[in-house]
Amino acid sequence: MEEKNSVSINELPSYSESLALDWTLSADEIQFILNSAKGDNPILNFAIQLKSLQNSGVFHDYDNEDVLPEKITQYLAKQLSIEIISLTPISKNSQTTYHKKIQTYLNYQDFSDKQEAFLKKYIMHEMKTDLYSESVLIEKARDFLKTHKIMRPAVTVFDRLIASIHKESMHLLYDNLANKLTPDKKEKILLMLKRQPHLLSQANYYKKSPPEPSQLKINTFIKRFNELKEAGITEIEFSDITESIFDKLELLGRTYDASALSHISPENKKIALLLCTLSSASKNILDHILDMNSKLLAKKERISQNFYEKTLKKLNSQAKKGLKFIIKTTKQWRYHADPKNTTLFDFIETVDDKALDDSIAACEAMSTYQTSGFYQILENKYNDLRKYTTHLFELEFKGAAGTESILKSIHILKKLNDEKSNTLPSDAPTDFIPKMWKQAICNDTDGVSRRTWEMALYYAIKNNIEKGDIYLNHSKKHRYFWNTVYSESAWEKEKPLAFKSLGFPEKFDELLAVLKKEYFAGITLSKNGLKEKSFFHLDQNGKLKLKRDDALEIPESVKTLKKLIEARMPPVRIEKMLSDIEEAHYFSRFFLPPEGFDKKFAINKEMLHMGLVAQGTNLGFDDMSKSTLSATSLEELKHTAQWCIRPDSVTKTNNFFVEKHAEHPLAQLHGDFSRSSSDAERFCIQKSTDLASFYPKAFGYYQKVIAIYTHMSDQFSVFSTQVISCGVREASYVLDGLLNNLMITSPHFHCTDTGGFTHQLFALCYLLGFSFQPRLKDLAVQTLYKFNRNDHYGEIDSMFGGHIDIDCIAEQWEQLIRIVVSLKNHVAPAHLILQKLAARGSSDRVAKAIMGLGKLIKTIYILYYLSDESLRRKVQLQLNRGETRHYLARHIFFANQGEFKTADYEEMMSIASCLSLLSNAVLLWNTPRIYNIVAELRASGIHVDDEDLKKVSLLLFKHLIVHGTYDFRAANMPVVDYASNLKEDA
C-alpha cells in the first residue's frame, strides 16, 4: 500500500484545550465544504480533512488506529447543520479528489524539488544556531512546511530527508571545526588520545578538578595548560559557532570514554569533539591555576598571621614584665628621695643592669615585631612560592585602566626571571606595595628589596584578579569585570528594553521616592514597636536589645496527628518508591544521552533507578552492583550513569517532580511556592580538593568538609543544588539557585541564615524582584543607615550608625541595571559577580552604589522585621522546613558514613543532585499517601484541622528503608527506546 502524507491523532490539537480555536469553520469554509461534497458523511469527511490540513499541515489518516475524538466530529457536524451517527471512511478516489480541492482552496503547494531545497536551506540554517536532534528537526520542519503552506511528503520520505539533512549539517560542522587545525596539530591531539588513553577517560586528565593547592599541584596545572597551548588548542576561535553548539559538543566529547572516543568515525568528528573538549578544558585549567594561586597565597597569609599572633603573645608577655621594671625604675628616678645629692652614677649603681637591659630589649622586640613581624614572616614564604610563580607569570596577564604599574611589574619580573637577576631596575613601580608593608620592611638607605617587591606584587595581582581588573583573556571565570557582564556594545543593544523588563524607571529619583515611603513607614512601625517593648527595646546607652521570640508552637494536636500519620505510612524500600513514581509519572523519559549522540540508545529503567539510588545514597556503583538481587552488570550500570545520569537530566527530572508535587492540594495547603529558603549542609570528604576546608564549629580542625547548598520551597521541594566550599560565604550562591530556576513558578520571598547575607545581595535581590528576608543572628549590632548624616529619628535615633550616599546610587543607576540584566539573562554566574563586587569594595563607584542600595534595603527590612512578629515567624517557619529536609538527606545519604569519596567536582555534583532527586521523590511519594491517610482519619470520625496539618512535615521518613539488599526487579520494566519521540506526560 502506498504510504500517505497523513497526520495521526497524536498530532492533532487537543480538543479539550483548543476545540473552538482549531475546529471552528468560517462562513466561507462552510460554503466551500457544502459546494464540494454531497451527503452528510462526505461533507463531514471533507470538513475534517480541511481543518486537519489547516491545523496540522497534513491530511487526516483514516487508516491510523487512532479514532478522531467524537467531540470534534460532533462540533463540526453541528456547524454544518447535519446529523451524523457514526463517521465512515469514503472511497480512495473521492478522498484524492477532496484532497486536491482542499489543497487548492488553502493555497498549499506540492512538495517539489524546489520546495525540498527551500526546506533544506531552512534546516541547515537552524542547525547553525543549535545542535538539534532529528526528532526536534522533524517538528521544526513540520511547522516550517505548514507555515509556508507546503504539502508534507510521505512519513518515511520525510523522515529520511530530515535525517539526511541532519547528517550533512553535522558533517559540515565537524569538518569546519576540524579544519581549524593544521594537519600537524590534528595529529598532535590524536596522539594525546593514543598515548594517554588512561588519562582521557570520563574523568578527563585535562578536566580533572584541582586538589588542595600546593606549589607542585599548581605547576602540574600550568604544565597541562602549556601542553594544550603547544597543541594549538588555545589559539582556536569559535566565533563562527554558537555557544550552545560548542557546549553540547564539549559535553558529548567529555562523556565518551577513551576507548569509544578513539573509535569514532569519521575522523573529523573525533577531532571536533576533542577540540571542543580540550578548548573548554584549557579555559578551566586557567581558572584552576588562578584559584589555586589565590588560595595558596591566602593560606600562606593565614599561616603567617597565626604564627605572628602566637609569637606576639609571647613577646607581649615578656614586654609587660619588662615594662613594669622600666616603670618602676623610672619612678625611682623621677621621685628620688634625694636627687640633689645623688649622681647619675650613684643612681645607676642601684639599678639591676641586666634586668634593665633585658626589659628594654623585650619592649624594643615587641615594638619592632608589632611593626614588621608579620611581613617578615610572610616574606619568609618567598622561596616556597618561587617554586611555581616563575611559571605562573609566563601566562599572558592583561589589565584594566589603573593597573598599568602592576602590568609593568609583571613584565619586569619576567625579565628578571629570564636573566636570573636579583637587582630591581630603578624604574620598577612600587605604588602597589601597601604603605604599612613598605614602612615596616623598607629603609631609606637600601630602598625596596627584590623579595619585598615581588611578594607585594603577588598579593597585588591576587587582589586585582579577584576584582576582575587583572585577568587572562582565555579564562572563563577570571575575565575583565565589565566583560563578565554585558560588554559596552552588547549593553547598547540591550539597554532600550532593560529598564522596562525589570519594571524600573530610567532615573533613580523615581524609585527613590518609593523607597523613602517604605523607609519612613518602617521608622513609624519601629517607634510603635519600641513603645510596646514586645520584641526590642533600647537600654540606657541607646543600644538595641532584643527579646527572643517564643519558639514556633507545636500544639499537642499536631504531635498527635503526626504520630497517627507516621503509624499509618506504609513501609517502603527506596527502590520500590522510585518504581512507584516511575509507573505514575514516567520520569525516566528525561534521562537522555547528550544531544549530538547519533546512535540508537536503549536504557533499562531498572539500571537507571539503580544508578540514581547508588549516587543518592552515596553507595557508589561498585557497592551497589554487589548489593542488589538484580542480575547486574557493573559495566552496564556505569554506562547508564555515564550517558544518562547527568546534571541537566537530573535537573529536568527534579523540576518535573517539583511542578508535579505543586499541583497536589496538600502541597498547596503548606504553601503556594511564593516563599523559599536556602541553606548549606556540610559533609566530610575523604579526598584532597580545593573545595574542602576546615569547619571547626562542627567538625573540628582534623576533618575537612564541603557543603551542599540547596534551595527549598515552602512546599518542601528542593529546586536547586550546588556543591560549594565552606570557606566562602553562602551569600554568594543565593542568587544562582533563584535565577537558575527554570520552572513555571518562582518564589518571591527568600530566607537565609546570617551566613547567606551581604549588602550586595540585598541590593541585587531587590533589583531582580526577590524580597530577601534573612534571619540575622547578630541583629542587635547590625548598622542601620540614614539618608543624610544630620537626619534625626527621635527616640530610635541611636539605632542608626551610618548614612547612604544616594548621589552615588543615582550616578551609577544605569550600570546597576546593566549588571542586574546581565544576571537575569544568565550572561554570567551570579556568585561570580557577587564575589567580584565584594572584592572591588567602596573604592569602585559601581560597587559602592550597589552596597549603598543594599544598606538602604537592609535598613528597611530590619525596621519591618523588628516590628512585625508575623514576618519573623514566616522566616523562622521556612528555615525550619529547610532543617527538616537536612534530616531526610542524612537518612538517605548513609553509605560510607555520609562522607564523600571523590574529589571530582562533576562527580560530587552528580551525587548531590541525585540526593536532591531522591529527596523530592520521597516528597512526591509521601504527599498523596499522607493526603489519603488524613481522608481516612476524617472518615473514621477523627477531627483533623487544616492548621494542624500545615504543621506536619511532608518529608516524613521513618517508613523509608534505605539499607539492606536492594531488589530493583520489582519494577521489571521494559527497555525503552530513547531514539523515538518522547510522549508528553499525561
Image (cartoon, rainbow, N blue to C red):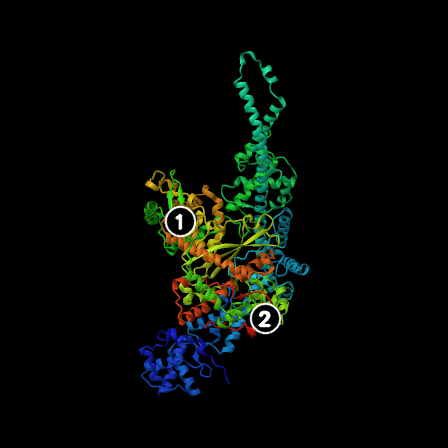
Pointer 1 and pointer 2: residues touching (CB < 8 Å)? no
Instruction: Tell me the element at label 2.
Output: loop
Q: Earlier in the sequence, mark 1 or mark 2?
A: 1
* Mark 1 element type: helix
The residue that disc 2 covers is 967
Of 509 and 700, which appears nearest the observer? 700
Residue 179: x and y in percent read: 59, 60
Numbered tag placed on residue 53 in the rendering: none
Residue 441 seen from this side: no
Q: Quadrant of residue 930?
A: bottom left
Whether residue 719 sits left or right of residue 894 in the image: it is left
Residue 611 in view here: yes
Give the percent coordinates (x, y) of residue 817. 41, 51
Q: Are there few (<14), some (14-19), or many (20+) residues within 10 Å of tag 1?
A: some
Query: Measured along the vertical axis of the image, is residue 925 above or below residue 286?
Result: below
* Quadrant of the rendering where the C terminus is positioned: bottom left
Residue 755 position (above or below residue 665)? above
